[in-house]
Amino acid sequence: MKNFISDSKGYYGEYGGAYIPEMLRHNVKELGDIYFDLINSDGFQKEYRNLLKNYAGRPSPLYFAPRLSEYYKANIYLKREDLNHTGSHKINNTLGQILLAKYMGKKRIIAETGAGQHGVATATVCALFGLECIVYMGEVDIERQQPNVKRMEMLGAKVVPAKSGSRTLKDATNEALRDWIANPEDTFYIIGSVVGPHPYPDLVAYFQSIISSELKEQLVEQNGDENPDYIIACVGGGSNAAGIFYHYIDNHKVKLIGVEAAGKGVNTDLNAASIKNGHRGVIHGSMTYLMQDDDGQIIEPYSISAGLDYPGVGPLHAWLNDSGKAKYIEATDQQALDAAYRCARLEGIIPALESAHAIAALDIMSFNTNDVIVINISGRGDKDMAAYIDSLKYLNNYE
Amino acid sequence: MNRIDSLFQNKKAQILSVYFTAGYPELEDTMKIIETLDKSGADMIEIGMPFSDPVADGPVIQESSKIALGNGMNLDLLFKQIKTLRQKTQIPVILMGYINPVFRMGMEIFLNKCQHAGIDGLILPDLPAEEYEEHFKSLFEERGINNILLITPQTSDTRILEIDNLSRGFIYVVSNYATTGGQSDFSSNQLSYFRRIKNLNLKNPLMIGFGISDKKKFNTVCEYAAGGIVGTSFIQALNEQGKIEKKVGEFVQKFKEVL
Ligand SMILES: Cc1ncc(COP(=O)(O)O)c(C=O)c1O
């Protein structure tokens, strides 16, 4: 059996695999047996490419950001995933997975969501394909990402609150998995990031890889060289990062930087920096870095950004980290807010709080004046206006 | 001889296995519950090792796990509590739980502690059969600990035969598409699934679990399997007012009565 990046059992080095109870095995194996050939079939590719172009609005622009470049004394490009239909990179993945569901004859779609971007992107493709849609979302996230809850409902999805644990993304994922256990026959689970049991990390990374295949062409066109010095992306589960890293993995000319959420600080109890603070462990069917205590209980994470508020990370990133193929740094809530305001004021672009963590790398790292830096703007900030308005006092610093 | 193996050698029908979550309702209830279950006539005991994210469990066991962890239960403490297990009882005891805390401790250290405490078997639902076979089977066998594997209504006959070959002790037949605790009556689909498994004439005895809430359902599963596993409804019984000994005794009695 062939795979995109992971080995035939879904491992990246020692990470990944499919640590799932027997109740999920049939579904996961059914998908694992067909995804590679199905995705590579002419019919699938034709339909997928058409939807990416004419429905999602791809290619997303690569934009040279002159005022950020001047401010940071480097050549900064923004990959504008925020301009996709539904406002983030998540649509690249949900269009792919809804096609898998269609080819497999599934009638009912479930998903988990943190920031609500994946939920919206799933509700959107379900409307498009006329399929029932149930989205699990932590109660805390329902509160802090209200606009997206309303969007999902308008699109016809049912949003079910997850009330256990920290009532965020991890707990929403638990509920989605429980739903799948109870409804194994007609239901397809559209996972929102490069997490979960094999084959999910592999297929989600593939669906997001469109970001770096476009980037290569756009960089040649605009800068005469497909290789930038740095590619920077935020890492929750790690799908937007996986997508923009994808075609540059093992390209030694390009430094790949993932930015995790440091919340109130990596040395406090309130962060979601799983690579920095985690230990090898199993979450949602995958061996990876996991924030856990000495007894192996999962630690409830924290970030101002709902999309990064997850105690694990995709196994691909665990492997990229250990092998030195990519480097992971952390940005705090405050650094992300700073970066969001800077991007807004200098470029007229309000980024999602998640993406703001990637932009914060410009403050955290140091660069040379000739460096070409690409930052993935994974989503737009509309959904985060409540949090941004909350920090209005803080906005005065910029006046 | 492994106590699970001798149980099934000596008793072929109406085997009652009872699950409870360690550290629930009170932190120090573990040994009291074990001893009372034994005295009341349960045949086998499954001790749940509570986990923060019990994905395969329904609301009742989720809640008991949360309370147990809140009470301060952890693996080290559990092993301390059951240090005197084998001075007190010879009932077969299985530990059941999610793989992450076990990996965190280290599988080998964990198995050594199990062997030391006199644990007879393990149920680790999110350790897939393939991973077990490739990496851990010999570690289990050297210590005489049975790994109990699950089958579900979706498990194909070929895979059931593979699991039968890999299993020791018994096979855990999950009764339904559900997390633990589904309560409605058995459907005709479930009964024909039980019949299909029974007719495969596997090497290992069968125990049916998930959703066995009363004596009537227990009797039904006993027509197809060596016995049944009761968890959620036992946790619910523990939840009620009264002394542990009395609640446990009365609960087991209900399953022992001849209808
Ligand atoms: C805009 C945006 N960026 C990033 C993420 C984080 O996910 P991932 O790390 O999978 O890209 C999310 C998740 O909700 C998101 O909405």
Image (cartoon, coloured by chain):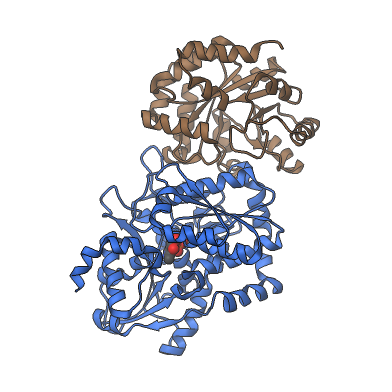
Chain colours: A blue, B brown
Q: Is residue A63 left or right of residue B97?
A: left
Q: Residue furthest right?
A: B199
Q: Quadrant of ligand 1?
A: bottom left
Q: Quadrant of residue A178?
A: top right
Q: Nearer the viewer, residue B131 or A57?
A: A57
User: What's the residue at 48%, 11% (across, down)?
Assistant: B245
Q: Nearer the viewer, residue B49 or A248?
A: B49
Q: Quadrant of residue B155?
A: top right
Q: Position of residue B212 (x, y in %)?
A: 64, 26
User: What's the residue at 49%, 54% (across, down)?
Assistant: A15
- Relative vertical location of residue A143 with respect to residue A379 in this rendering, above or below: above
Q: Position of residue A145 (x, y in %)?
A: 41, 58
Q: Position of residue A29 (x, y in %)?
A: 66, 52
- Relative vertical location of residue A60 with respect to residue B259 in this rendering, above or below: below
State which quarter of the image contains the C terminus of chain B: top right
Q: Is residue B225 visible?
A: yes
User: What's the residue at 57%, 36% (across, down)?
Assistant: B138
Q: Nearer the viewer, residue A163 or B106?
A: A163
Q: Position of residue B143 (x, y in %)?
A: 54, 28
State which quarter of the image contains the N terminus of chain B: top right
- Relative vertical location of residue A368 with respect to residue A3 in this rendering, above or below: below
Q: Quadrant of residue A276?
A: bottom left
Q: Is residue A260 left or right of residue B97?
A: left
Q: Nearer the viewer, residue A268 or B43?
A: A268
User: What's the residue at 57%, 22% (across, down)?
Assistant: B18
Q: Is residue B193 left or right of residue B41?
A: right
Q: Is residue A238 visible?
A: no
